[in-house]
């Protein structure tokens, strides 16, 4: 018995050593997704939003996420401007590196360039949107709506209401204010469509351009005929798995690859062009590489010069992968007031202070339904379906992002409603009831 017990103990110890060695040398992708996600979220929130790293880890990463995320530990190096993360203290190490003006990037095997962007000039004094002064409505009905936690939703962080071109109401959760940049997740996709619009207006890009200049391998198969128009409508036919919470195409792209578009552009065509709707973050990030390749000058400063500076969006940080391709699907930070500026641009048909930033008629085209999406998605990387699976509401369009990020644009009511927060989809929150209450309170 004693000899048998020694053999069992020795075998268990050997297996434990082997398992530990395996986790150290070749950790499973699920663990690497978890650590890279954690490092990235903490890094961006610390160095862009100025938040406490332990709070971000606990509230943003661990509380709403996969149970494995509760086993994450982090190390913040403020001098090197990095965040490192491990699973169980040792396994699947991940590093996210901050650069001024470009935010945080997960670094695997490649090295980041030394590129940075200088801080933009502050806004002049004056009323929003030219300045940042606001005069909020004192209407008791509006005040009641903006203090109704059920309408604002569990985990809300910022709500801004624009009416007739001015901010008339806003609310912020504890720890957040009008100066806090917040992640838009997939609302970034619509910004990518806006940037493409600026290039179309300048004649450097067309909706009917194919993508083979950026992705020459596509010229060898039926992907050669995919156009920018097809990509914006999410009807390119490319295969893509957008499921979160596991190892899928989207999590592999965002958290396991230095060159995100190199990974995404390797997806095969799974359907004929224009026959299926497939929502894809890979599509939007590939489009970033396409528009960046259209520029003769530095593409990293282009979003600020062409769009954000004219709109007064001084808080924006648009993040990249290690190849300096903007992650046009997911990674833009901005204050709620700056997100509202972009929504207002769409409401004003691409015009801003007597300047046509987007081509005439471009936003009308963006708002047109994609037929193969059952008319729930617009041709310009936005939603016609209201948040929470509600059917389209009047002529409104929606920017929608992971964990409860929404911008509703309501042309019939000259209104934009921004709602940002940390609200997992399982809570089934929708900002449509909030918008409806506001419309009623405004007397329409």
Image (cartoon, rainbow, N blue to C red):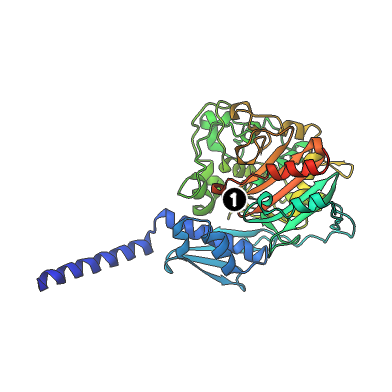
x and y percent of residue 93 in the render? 46, 64
Image quadrant in which the N terminus is located: bottom left
Depth check: give the residue in front, 16 or 218: 16
x and y percent of residue 246 in the render? 46, 49
Depth check: give the residue in front, 270 or 46: 46
Depth check: give the residue in front, 92 or 173: 173
Q: Is residue 50 visible?
A: yes
Give the residue displayed 61% in from the left and 60% down from the top.
104
Give the residue displayed 47% in from the left and 46% down from the top.
248
In the image: residue 135, left or right of residue 308: right
Query: Counting other residues with Cα less than 10 Å from the Cα at mark 1, is it few (<14), some (14-19), or many (20 or more)?
Result: many
Q: Is residue 309 visible?
A: no
Compared with 13, 399 (above or below) is: above
In the image: residue 146, left or right of residue 139: left
Give the residue displayed 42% in from the left and 66% down from the top.
88
Where is mark 1, residue-wise? 403
């Amino acid at each position: 018995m004693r000899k048998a017990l020694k053999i069992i103990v020795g075998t268990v110890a050997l297996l434990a050593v082997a398992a530990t060695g395996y986790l150290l040398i070749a950790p499973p992708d699920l663990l690497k997704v978890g650590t890279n996600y954690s490092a990235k979220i903490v890094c961006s929130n610390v160095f862009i939003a100025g938040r406490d790293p332990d709070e971000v880890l606990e509230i943003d990463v661990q509380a709403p996420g996969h149970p494995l995320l509760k086993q994450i530990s982090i190390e913040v190096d403020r001098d090197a401007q990095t965040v490192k993360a491990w699973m169980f203290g040792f396994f699947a190490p991940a590093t996210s590196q901050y650069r001024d003006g470009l935010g945080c990037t997960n670094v695997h095997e490649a090295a980041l360039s030394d590129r940075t962007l200088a801080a933009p000039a502050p806004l002049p004094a004056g009323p929003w949107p030219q300045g940042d002064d606001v005069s909020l409505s004192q209407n008791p009905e509006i005040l009641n709506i903006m203090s109704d936690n059920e309408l604002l939703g569990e985990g809300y962080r910022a709500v801004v209401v624009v009416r007739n071109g001015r901010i008339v109401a806003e609310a912020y959760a504890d720890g957040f204010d009008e100066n806090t940049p917040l992640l838009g997740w997939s609302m970034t996709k619509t910004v990518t469509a806006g940037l493409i619009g600026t290039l179309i207006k300048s004649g450097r890009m067309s909706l009917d351009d194919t993508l083979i200049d950026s992705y020459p391998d596509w010229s060898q198969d039926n992907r050669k005929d995919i156009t920018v128009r097809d990509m914006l409508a999410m009807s390119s036919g490319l295969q893509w798995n957008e499921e979160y919470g596991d190892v899928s195409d989207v999590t592999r792209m965002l958290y396991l690859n230095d060159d995100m578009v190199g990974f995404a552009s390797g997806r095969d065509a799974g359907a004929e062009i224009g026959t299926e709707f497939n929502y894809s973050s890979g599509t939007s990030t590939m489009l970033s590489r396409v528009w960046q390749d259209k520029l003769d000058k530095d593409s990293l400063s282009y979003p600020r010069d062409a769009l954000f500076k004219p709109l007064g969006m001084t808080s924006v940080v648009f993040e990249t992968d290690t190849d300096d391709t903007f992650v046009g699907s997911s990674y833009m930070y901005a204050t709620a007031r700056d997100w509202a500026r972009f929504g207002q641009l769409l409401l004003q048909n691409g015009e801003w202070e007597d300047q046509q930033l987007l081509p005439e008629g471009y936003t009308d085209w963006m708002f047109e339904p994609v037929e193969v999406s059952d008319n729930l998605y617009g041709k310009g990387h936005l939603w016609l379906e209201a948040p929470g699976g509600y059917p389209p509401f009047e002529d409104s369009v929606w920017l929608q992002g992971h964990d409860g990020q929404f911008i509703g644009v309501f042309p019939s009511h000259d209104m934009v409603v921004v709602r940002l927060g940390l609200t997992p989809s399982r809570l089934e929150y929708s900002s449509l009831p909030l918008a409806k209450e506001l419309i009623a309170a405004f007397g329409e």
